[in-house]
Amino acid sequence: MLTLYYAPNTCALASHIALEQAGADYRAVRVDFARNEQRSPEYLKLNPKGRVPALVSDRGVLTETPAILQYVAQTHPAAALAPLDDAFALAQLNAFNSYLCSTVHVAHAHMRRGYRWVDDEAAMAAMKQKVPQNMADCFALIERDHLQGPWVLGERYSIADPYLFTIAQWLAGDGVDIERFPKVAAHHRRMQADAAVMRVLAVAQAPA
């Protein structure tokens, strides 16, 4: 059995949804950030980065959302969550997921975790002010160039879709109206209506 360590309102939601949609044999363990459990000795032994998600498999621990998503897709090929038979399409998917991980997530993190980059309070405040513009710019690019519709890869659903859904969840808190991006907003509503997504949200967003 796989074990996913997650926290509410984090990027771990994407992996959680993928596991559920893949029909994986897994359990989800909540890490309480309010109690700083991600910095506990027990959790740091599991994931020295002190972040989520972390996926424990029989071969070891995986971290980083793009890696976990591809692992889920490759170990559950019957679920058809990635174009494993098409090298170019798979590379396109990984390029999109890498953009979400390395650029969009980082732009979002400047709102609440500026301390990762600077110590100066004024610099942190300036970073926060820039977040709405940066996130809007990222999603304008996604809307125009990457969301082929109805799914990220067009007619084929993939692990890129729960990842996009997860990060789009953060837009309101970042001061960006998702309705500015009609294709992204329609994608978000489509994901919210999915039965597996609803099951995961009921668990992942439940009060502690």
Image: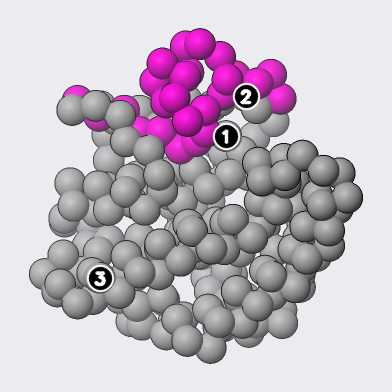
Residue 193 appears anywhere in the view = no
> Mark 1 highlights which residue?
7
> Mark 2 highlights which residue?
32
Check disc 2 and give the amino acid type. Answer: Asp
Please state, as top left, top right, bottom left or bottom right, where the C terminus lies in the image.
Answer: top right
- Distance, label 2 to label 3, CA atoms, is 34 Å
Residue 49 appears anywhere in the view = yes
Image: 121 above or below 37: below
Please state, as top left, top right, bottom left or bottom right, where the N terminus lies in the image.
Answer: top left
> Mark 3 highlights which residue?
91
Question: Residue sitting at 24 percent across and 27 percent down?
Answer: 60
- Find out whether residue 82 is within the magenta segment: no
Mark 2 / mark 3, whichever is N-terminal: 2
Question: Residue sitting at 46 percent across and 37 percent down?
Answer: 53
Check disc 3 and give the amino acid type. Answer: Ala
- Find residue 138 and report its image quarter: bottom right
**Helix, strand, or loop for circle 1?**
loop
- Distance, label 1 to label 2, CA atoms, is 6 Å
Image: 43 above or below 102: above
Q: Viewed as shown, does residue 22 lie left or right of 181? A: left
**Helix, strand, or loop for circle 2?**
loop
Q: Viewed as shown, does residue 29 lie left or right of 91? A: right
Percent of width and height locating residue 131: 74, 63
Point out the stretch of residues depicted in magenta. 34-58
Check disc 1 and give the amino acid type. Answer: Ala
- Find out whether residue 42 is within the magenta segment: yes
Q: Which residue lies furthest to the left in this view?
A: 85
Mark 1 in CB contact with mark 2 (< 8 angstroms): yes
Q: Viewed as shown, does residue 19 lie left or right of 116? A: left
Q: Which residue lies furthest to the bottom in this view?
A: 144
